Image (cartoon, rainbow, N blue to C red):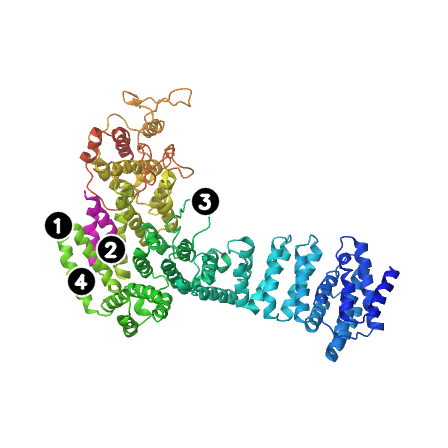
Amino acid sequence: MQALDLLLQSFLSENKSMDEMCFLLQHVEPWLHSDKSHERKRAAQTTFLLLQYTVDYVTLTEEATPSLLGHQLGLLALLWQDKDPVTRSHSRQSIYLLLQLLIQQKGSTEQFILLNKMKNFEAKARRQSEKKCYNVVKALNRSLTVAQHTQLVLTLVERLGSRSQPQCDLASQLLLLLLEERRVKREQVAEILQGLFQELSSVMFKGVLQTMMKVVTVLGTQYTQETVEVILSLGHPSERQVLLLWKALAGNPKLARRVLTLLYMKLKVRPTGKLLRLSQPAELISLLALGTIYELLYTREYKATVRWAFAGLLVGLLTQLRYLFELGVVDGISDYEEDVLEVQPLSPCRTCLEALKGLFWTTNYWEVFAHLKLLRGWELFEHLETYTEGVTLLARAMAHYDCEVKAVLGQAVISLKSSEERDNIVAILIITEFLNSQELTQYVSRRTVDSFLSLGLNHPNQLVRAMSLKGLSSTLMHPKKVVLLRGQLAGLLDRFGKPDPKDLMGLMEILGDILHRLGTQGVGAASLKMAQHLLPLFEDEQAPVRGGAISLFGDVVHSGGRKYRPELKPFAFQALVPLLLHLADPCPDVATHTKLTFLRCAILLKWEFRKELFGKLAWGHGLGAENDIFIYTVESNLGSYHQFLMQALHYLASPHGNLRRTAMKFIGGLLHDYFTDLCFSLKKGDLNVLRKREPRGPRTWHLFVSRILRRALNQPVPMTGHHLVLEIPFLDTAVTPTPRMGSWDRAVPPIPRMFSWDRAGSPPHPNGFLGQSSAPHPALPQPGGTVQQLGVSAADVEVLRQDPDSMSRRFYHSVLEDISELSQFVTH
């Protein structure tokens, strides 16, 4: 080793320059990061002796600043926590000597004094390693050139993926100190971020990864725009490593807002078709920003920031979608399947549409999302021809649910003044619909609305001119129209009272238009009368009339405003069972309208599981979804089981087989899941209308339980005199119920839930009213509920005896008998 030291010293004596010294130290590097302790020890000793010789005996004649010196400093710094104390000491002293040589070259007296203080501190306080590291880092930041500093940082970054946890921890801590102590130069950002990105997949320790994310946060805070641009260029945001970098930028709320603002600005960088190479659309910066925004919507760290930027993102996504339509980049927008679990890359148009939908879902404005989903309104955004209709429907839903009206209106006014036609179109569509918002007058005056609507009257685009004129003629701008429309509404409602009103579809269309035009003013007490007239139309023979009445009813229950909302709630409650049963309507369009109106009633009645109900209505299939809807409906209306039962019985005489079967299943569910409650809520008068004759012989609790068990097993019920002999397959002997005198009380155990809507699992039959049409099952109940006492007679039920459907006949002979027996336990 002594010979090697002498050889290196002789080489340096022949060429007294910093470049020569770095060249000689370069040959020692492989042993400085060797896995063997003794090799690292000898390499550190050789480095120290050469540097000590240089400081003591050599005067460097040529001033040079090789970038390689930063790399060598990094290697020596990584030995500060080596297991061998000699190696640790030599590595520290080597760094001081290198810094001394750099200071001598620059001739900086201030830095020289600082270095001497560091040496004294090194001798007196070896245990205070953290403060010592900070002082060394401070000296390095002041002494190194930009190139040397970059090499030092990259050397530390390369060791972050090491298998040695102490070395990884030291590298990450030094890296963070280096970047926090001094602001890096703009040209360093890209190289440092690229180095971090390459090492992300190799990091093995959680603490090291967390420190790396802090480094990214520091870089983002110092140079937000450069950091965002570099991360955009690293890969698709859905990649795990890239998404980690975006998450790191959300560590600081202010930084997260700046990041999202920059992405929004880049989303607006939209070159025209003439300047765009359509063969490589992925190169568009706006598409990169679009994909990133889509991913960040579902990133927890950006949840609050997305809510803050809601208005800008909404308008930006709407205009971006129209821009993509104008470019003709529409491939794959209609091929998306929500139910497919396989992850496939989305086309630009589909990404934009999914981001638009996700914006409402992730910010908890799920009512707006649900409104469009159940009306199939999102499909309007898949074609340029129906795009404006989709924006109008979306803005109308936002106004209805008061979804960020103030912020979006402000953003729309800004877009209305833009020089881009697509911005003007989106803005005017939003503004004209917001004029019907009940909250708009709180945010802006009529004079202000008049001023920005007038901007569109001279616009070259015909749609902008037409919508501006429509907005200027709204009831908000002309309050006197409210009196005229309400007067017209009263006359139209009188037509409903006639025995056979003509052109019901036209009448309901006009009423719907008046409801929409009255907007902020509302229809007042007329909404109660309208709801009353619409309920009987749910059972009209013509499917278009049923669908129109159900759809209009959903608008009516929300048209009375806060003043009449309590009075409209009974009508919404009264419509629950009819609406729920019409989910099985033979007409698909009626079923579609029913889903939305049913949800709107649930929202008005403030059910606890409204969002879950929407999920079942939108995506549920089969008996599992039926089971959940049944539970949501009945459990959200505790104490109303008897009213639900009486209304459902009315549908046993429905001319539509689907509705009859659904009603049977619903009645079965009530009888078996809520038998105890029915015994205490039903009255004798409710059941007398169903009995054709008085029950023969003693009717007891045990007899009723035996009949229920027999029907649960789908076996015939043999009768012997006044007693029922029940043969149960899983029992060794037959069971003969014993008559019991007296009324039934709550001490009697409830009926076993053998085949009803079991909350622990789905009923045995594979299909139901939310799935495909299927052969009905007599024992399966169905959802429902309402409060109105309809006229139910024995004749309505008697028709089931002659029904060609075997399910109806079995229902008549089983459930109807049980209802008659149930009357024995109803004592009031």
Left or right, 221 with reference to 623 = right
Left or right, 499 with reference to 685 = left
Q: Earlier in the sequence, mark 3 or mark 4?
A: 3
Q: Residues within 10 Å of mark 2 (few under 14, many from 20)?
A: many
Mark 4 vs mark 1, CA separation in Å: 21 Å
Residue at numbered disc 4: 486
Give the quadrant of the N terminus: bottom right
User: SS of the residue at dot 4?
Assistant: helix
Horizontal and vertical percent position of residue 487: 15, 62
Of the two numbered discs 1 and 2 in the rendering, the one whose residue sits closer to the viewer: 1
Q: Are marks 4 and 1 in contact (CB under 8 Å)?
A: no
Specify the amino acid type for callout 2. Answer: Val
The residue nearer to you, when weighing 297 against 270, is 270
Residue at numbered disc 2: 556
Left or right, 324 with reference to 255 = left
Q: Is residue 826 visible?
A: no
Mark 1 vs mark 2, CA separation in Å: 21 Å
Mark 3 vs mark 4, CA separation in Å: 51 Å
Of the two numbered discs 3 and 4 in the rendering, the one whose residue sits closer to the viewer: 3
Specify the amino acid type for callout 1. Answer: Lys
